Image (cartoon, helix red, strand yellow):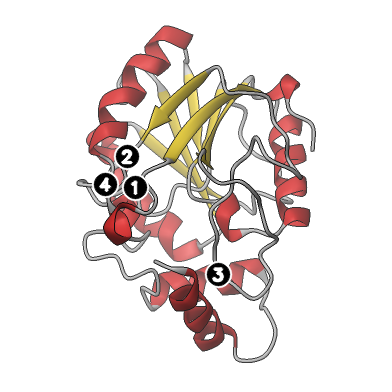
């Protein structure tokens, strides 16, 4: 999804002004405004676009000795449900009530639990690692700061975060519905991740080939 298309979507959703986060993301889900065919979480949550990540994530969790995993936000779990959660306690969190209800009915048999929460404000379940993919790209800088502080309060040791490593600058969200972010560039200026899972993204003709998930210790991040 390019920025011009994203801006048109945002205008369609909001009319005038930006609604509260729960209303905002609920309407995106209900109207499938991310345009996903396989998943209402968007094209980036298809099995094709997550193939490399589904290969790389399980061995990383094993290497780190992760016993509890918080997927925040979890979306519809279209691709996460393909992984084996028999040895790692999985909890998915999302701000959209209908998503949580649907996930609880579809995926609980796969040892996956779900709860409703605003990542920027609500208490979060304790987990060894928080996986936050394709989230901060939809938040403004103030919301991202609040989200990071909330992750810190949760007591998690590790964060896996979406980052676009080839981007030279970051802009605030403004009137867009999303934009790519490089977390090693201001205003974040995070240190290099200890691990980088390159997703192999082919969306929009490969212009997001740098899309990755980086691993950081929570204690090392300040924003």
Instruction: Give SS at disc 2.
Output: helix
Q: Nearer the viewer, residue 114 or 42?
A: 42
Locate residue 37 relative to residue 45 in the image: left or right.
left
Circle 4 sits in a helix, a strand or a loop, which is it? loop
Q: Position of residue 136 (x, y in %)?
A: 60, 50
Indicate the secondary structure of the residue bearing disc 1.
loop
Marks 3 and 4 in Cβ contact (< 8 Å): no
- Kindly identify which numbered label has been placed on residue 177: 3
> Few, some or many C-alpha atoms within 10 Å of disc 4 (few <14, some 14-19, many ≥20)?
some
Neighbor class of circle 2 (other Cα within 10 Å; few <14, some 14-19, many 20+) is many
Q: Residues within 10 Å of mark 1 (few under 14, many from 20)?
A: many
State the residue position of label 4.
Answer: 49
Instruction: Tell me if 66 is positioned left or right of 80 in this view.
Output: right
- Gap between marks 3 and 4 measured at Cα: 20 Å
Horizontally, residue 191 falls left or right of residue 161, namely right
**Label 4 vs 2, first from the N-terminus:** 4
Label 3 vs label 2, nearer the camera: 3
Mark 4 and mark 1: Cα distance apart in space? 14 Å
Q: Which residue is mark 2?
A: 80
Callout 3: 10 Å neighbours few (<14), some, many (20+)?
A: many
> Mark 1 and mark 2 in contact (Cβ < 8 Å)?
yes
Tell me the residue that label 1 is attached to.
Answer: 77
Label 3–label 1 contact, CB within 8 A: no
Please name which of the two marks, 4 or 1, marks the residue nearer to the observer. 4
């Amino acid at each position: 999804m390019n920025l011009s298309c994203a801006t048109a979507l945002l205008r369609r959703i909001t009319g005038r002004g930006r609604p509260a986060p729960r209303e905002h993301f609920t309407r995106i889900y209900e109207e499938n405004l991310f345009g996903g065919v396989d998943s209402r979480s968007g094209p980036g949550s298809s099995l094709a676009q997550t193939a490399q990540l589904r290969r790389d994530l399980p061995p990383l969790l094993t290497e780190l000795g992760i016993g509890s995993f918080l997927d925040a936000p979890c979306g519809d779990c279209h691709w996460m449900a393909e992984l084996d959660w028999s040895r790692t306690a999985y909890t998915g969190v999302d701000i959209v009530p209908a998503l949580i209800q649907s996930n609880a009915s579809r995926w609980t048999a796969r040892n996956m639990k779900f709860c409703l929460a605003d990542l920027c404000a609500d208490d979060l379940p304790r987990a060894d690692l928080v996986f936050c993919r394709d989230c901060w790209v939809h938040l403004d800088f103030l919301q991202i700061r609040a989200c990071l502080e909330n992750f810190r309060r949760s007591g998690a040791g590790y964060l896996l975060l979406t980052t676009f490593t080839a981007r030279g600058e970051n802009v605030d969200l403004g009137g867009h519905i999303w934009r790519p972010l490089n977390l090693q560039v201001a205003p974040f200026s995070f240190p290099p991740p200890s691990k980088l899972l390159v997703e192999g993204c082919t969306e929009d003709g490969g212009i997001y080939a740098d899309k990755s998930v980086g691993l950081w210790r929570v204690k090392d991040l300040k924003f």
